[in-house]
Amino acid sequence: MAAAETVIFRARYLLPIIGPCIENGALVVRNGRIDEIGDARRLAASHPAWQVVDFGDALVLPPMANAHTHLELTHIPYWDAFGAQKEVPGFTAWLLRLIGVLRGVPPEEFSVSLQDGIRQVLNSGTGAVGDILSRIHARQAYRHCPLRGRIFLEALGTDRHRNKRTLECLKKALDEKAPGAMTFGLAPHSLYTLSTEFLQGLTGLAARLHLTQSIHLAESPEETLFVRDAAGPFVEHLYPRIGWGDRIPPARELSPAGRMARLKLLRPGDLLVHGVQVSDADIDILAGMGVYVVLCPRSNHRLKVGKAPVSAYLNAGVALLLGTDSLASNDSLSLWDEMAFARQCYGEDLDPGTLLGMATYQGARALGLGGEMGALAPGYGAHFQVLKPADLPAIHDIESFLCRPGRTAEVQALYLDGKPCNP
Ligand SMILES: [Zn+2]
């Protein structure tokens, strides 16, 4: 093995996530993979011929894994020139506005927007995403990009003929290899935007192709009213305004989580996004299904849909992840900003160690990158971010420092496969 292929990366602190923080630590990287991790002086002394990259007073940890994004919508702040739907209540007004804005965007704009989203997440130290993509043609934006994770091809609809065509398009796209370093998943949008028949068609396709699914579930009280009682603003405003007024499904007399369980369409490892409007019984159901719940606290706060019951989830053993959602309901695509908000929002219910684990190790595992990304340990790919805050705390304060409310991260570099990849 040539010495030039082995590099020692040194920093004041290494945070492996699956082990304690190391002061004056180093990573030995051989051919893009982590070979050894430990004390910097010992490693440099025992391998004097190897190149050393010294990050100095910096902190090195695994990249962020943002489990829920819609990167194709990154340019929404530029596109949104519409007025609010004043006579329609909260969450429904937001949905109608979003639908209205997106109808006016030329198809080619989504690729440019997606490229910008990719640039923004990489710049914020993110190495993997669970990205929802509805404009399938835009997927080639991933072709030359170092990001990992899943592209969840999204579908929604209640019209039988149109759904058939959408399913054929999806099958064709899924026949190809996913672009770049990504893999494919499937995203049935939600219980309130899919006919049961189409939802079953999509989940059947996911099962046949062994694809992980991501679905928005239990986000708003409006969704619960719609599914359980066939009532509320979705029935009164959303469906009629988008031309679906004659396709309102019957009351299911079940919560959204209960309905999903009854349909038996989810498999262990699928991602349920939001999970805000859930009862204790729903949480037990989700724990039994072995699914992940992706929290998006800033989006939930902005749309005033409530707060996910984090301690109940953790007590029930539900695996939690963190996502930013899109810029249609958030200020940034940085998971650092999301962690800072989550700490403020959930307080002691979500301790810094758990939060950091969700944002890195757990997120990477859920996105199909277990053993590859999300930890600094021998055998993992050499994927890490380098932070250079103005002041570094003492070693015992590192985790709470990194999740401090109001904090913004100082990401200096992101390395994937041992190479710097910030655009
Ligand atoms: Zn979403």
Image (cartoon, rainbow, N blue to C red):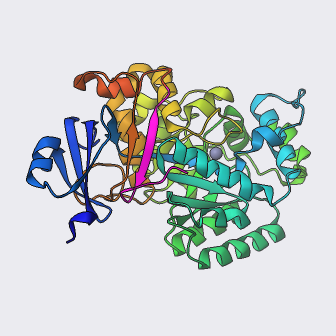
Q: Position of residue 276 (x, y in %)?
A: 56, 34
Q: Position of residue 74 (x, y in %)?
A: 69, 45
Answer with the quarter of the image where residue 19 lies: top left
Answer with the quarter of the image where residue 358 lies: top left
Residue placed most toward the observer, 18 or 279: 18
The stretch drawn in magenta includes residue 420: yes
Residue 200 visible to an observer of this rendering: yes
The stretch drawn in magenta includes residue 151: no
Q: Which residue corresponds to the image point at 20% horizontal and 36% vertical from the top-left?
A: 24
Q: Which residue corresponds to the image point at 16% horizontal and 45% vertical from the top-left?
A: 38
Residue placed most toward the observer, 137 or 115: 115
Q: Position of residue 267 (x, y in %)?
A: 47, 60
Which residue is most to the front?
49
Count of labels in the image = 0
Q: Quadrant of the N terminus?
A: bottom left
Q: Which residue corresponds to the image point at 49% horizontal and 56% vertical from the top-left?
A: 270
In the image: residue 32, left or right of residue 80 = left
Query: Quarter containing ligand 1?
Result: top right
- Residues in magenta, as a range: 408-423
Q: Position of residue 252 (x, y in %)?
A: 67, 47
Residue 320 visible to an observer of this rendering: no
Residue placed most toward the observer, 104 or 60: 60
Q: Which residue corresponds to the image point at 71% horizontal and 63% vertical from the top-left?
A: 138
In the image: residue 199, left or right of residue 230 = left
The correct choice, above or below, for 4 with respect to 39 in the image is below
